[in-house]
Image (cartoon, rainbow, N blue to C red):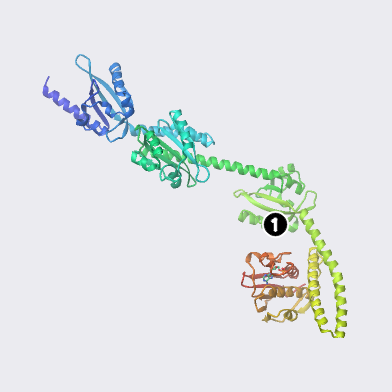
Amino acid sequence: MDKNKVKLDKEFYARLLDSLEGYAVFTMDKAGLVTSWNKGAERLLGYKDDEIIGKNASTILLPDERKDGEQVKELNAVSHQGNIKSERWYLNKMGYTLLSSDTIYPLRDRRGAISGYVKVMRDVSDFRRSENNLLFLSEASKLLSSSLNYTKTLNRVAEIAVPQIADWCTVDLLVGKGKIEQVAVAHKDPKKVTWAKELRKKQPIDMKTNSGVPHVLRTGKSEFYPLVTDKMLAASVKTKKTLDLVRSLQITSVILVPLLVGGMAIGVITFLTTGGRKRFTKTDLRMAEELATRASLVINNAQLYKSARENEFKFKSFVRSNIIGVFIANKEGKIYAANESFSKIIGYSREELKQGKVIRWKLVPREYETREKKAMKELEQKGSTTPWEKEYIRSDGSQIPVLVTSTLIEPSSGTNITLVVDMTERKKLEQRKDEFIGIASHELKTPLTSIKGYIQILERIIREMGNERAKTLISKTNTYINRMNSLISDLLDVSKIQSGKIRFNYEKFDFYDLVTEVIDAIQPTTTKHTIICKDCIHQDIIGDRNRLEQVFTNLLSNAIKYSPKADKVTIRMTRDSKYITVGVTDYGIGIEKRHHDKLFRRFYRIEKSSNQFSGLGIGLYISSEIVNRHGGKIWVESMEGKGSTFYFKLPLKNK
Ligand code: ADP
């Protein structure tokens, strides 16, 4: 044979082998000592040929497998079976693990006896890793979507992660403020799982640590440690005992990913490899983050579902409790669901209601139609109505007083729910109260009139006797009698308004005269205030003079009463083609905006000032009733601490 040709062939094959990207080829003798080492092997495993030739090929195995004599076993198998293909993890010189798909052949001498071995390795780490990760992710996703019991599911996910993806997989969830619970822990050895669970019980996690589960919970960001060094371990734990413990785990690589719900970390999935078997790469981190995203979605959905179920349950219990009437109607007002209480209020059976026989408008008396339309508009625009009082027409034609409020439950379709309170008893009570006020004030008025008469006789006698001290006392008595008289008259008015018995006697008169008369009567009752009439004008109007006098007196007395520190009250009159407007301005305590409309209600007084100023809270109510009945309007403009102006306007042409 041509020696030169053989040499050329050898060189050619050696170069060919070296140029194969991703392939490592090396030979061993019978004892497993490396005899040749190509460039591919150097690239893959980090050793130069002079560093490894002559050494045992088990140098590149994982420490565990080296101990177990894997190399000897493998070579024996090849000796008996010929070529062997396998896949295993290796450790390169830099400490990186890699998964290789190997073929190992025996080398034979001329007589056919085994003289050594050749191993061809192909790095499949990335490929297998991605494949494994994908398989795991799809398996885990199937599990996650299979049940709403997410703690159970997370446990199953952790279980299938070991040992392919990691040696340990744990899931911690935030339960309550600053407390975490390990809801899942998996390892291929069940004894280790029990050990880990007990360990967690004995040594709860320190929530203040700057790495690991508590830190991920705080930041909501993943943590990735491809290679955990002893230095890192020492920095992450506080006591020697814990350090010994984590050292004994032989942690190699760690990934922690947050479970995010609504931007908040509610838990952490941890993947851990041990014993130098596998180092996580960015591919693994991406997979873990993808898994966490899917798991978070499932947790979120499960929690939403749970709270929706709870809300539904609470709502149903509330409806069934029949404390108040409840019905659900569609946009057109068709009632299709109602509780027993509502059915009793309106006198239709629930069956009739279910059959859609009743529509909202059918229940509304004519006098409430405008108000009802306004409420429906409010419902459409704001999503709910302010509670308002009205009446319903019952199935027998009678009317029942109710307090109602509606809320949209499905804005897209206009479906809404209405709560209805039966006001019959309250109305009866109010009626009895009004009757009582009417009777009581009437009963008080009669003796007071007699007292007033006797006092007048007494006054005359005393004047004749010329007793000055008695004269003063009688005059004081008269002041109190007058005050009492006006209080009783006001109460009688309230009862008249309530029962619709208030009557007006219309006449034509100059409003200017009324204003000046009242000012003349009130001015002597105050020593502090000067009542100034600015821009007061003559204007004939038609109205009940006494009742309008009552309105103006009331506003003027209030202006004085509620401005104890001021020295004046100003009256202004303006007129346009239709109305005359009177404004009474004081410089007193003023009124917060939220009270402005309510002041004209019966018995309404502002609590804050009610101790300081005596009164019954009916003056403005009576005034507004009188003004309204004249076709006018009464209102206030005021700011707390800045004084108030009460206005009322009356039409120039009345009845
Ligand atoms: P009363 O003065 O007897 O309480 P009114 O019906 O006249 O009853 O007034 C109702 C409430 O309105 C008063 O209790 C007071 O809180 C408030 N109010 C009325 N007038 C004034 C005013 N000029 N300045 C401040 N508060 C006022």
Name above or below for residue 551 compared with residue 148.
Answer: below
* Quadrant in which the C terminus appears: bottom right
* Quadrant in which the N terminus appears: top left
- Give whichever of 484, 509 is nearer the camera: 484
Residue furthest to the front in view is: 240
The quarter holding residue 516 reads bottom right
- Residue at the image point whose x is 81% and y is 79% from the top: 473
Name above or below for residue 263 compared with residue 445.
Answer: above
Q: Is residue 376 left or right of residue 397?
A: left
- Residue at the image point whose x is 21% and y is 28% from the top: 53
Q: Is residue 196 visible?
A: yes
- Give whichever of 247, 185 is nearer the camera: 247
x, y (%) of residue 307?
58, 43
x, y (%) of residue 191?
45, 28
The quarter holding residue 251 reads top left
- Residue at the image point whose x is 69% and y is 74% from the top: 559
x, y (%) of residue 514?
75, 79
Count every numbered label the image shows and give the total: 1
| Pointer 1 residue Cβ closer than 8 Å to ligand 1 | no
- Badge 1 marks a residue whose secondary structure is strand
Assign ligand 1 to one image quadrant: bottom right
x, y (%) of residue 89?
33, 29
Rate crowding at label 1 as few (under 14), some (14 to 19) or many (20 or more) other CA atoms within 10 Å.
few
Name above or below for residue 28 compared with residue 501.
Answer: above
Residue type at tag 1: Trp
The residue to which callout 1 is attached is 388
Q: Is residue 539 visible?
A: no
Residue furthest to the top in view is: 111
Q: Is residue 297 left or right of residue 507?
A: left
Name above or below for residue 200 compared with residue 362.
Answer: above
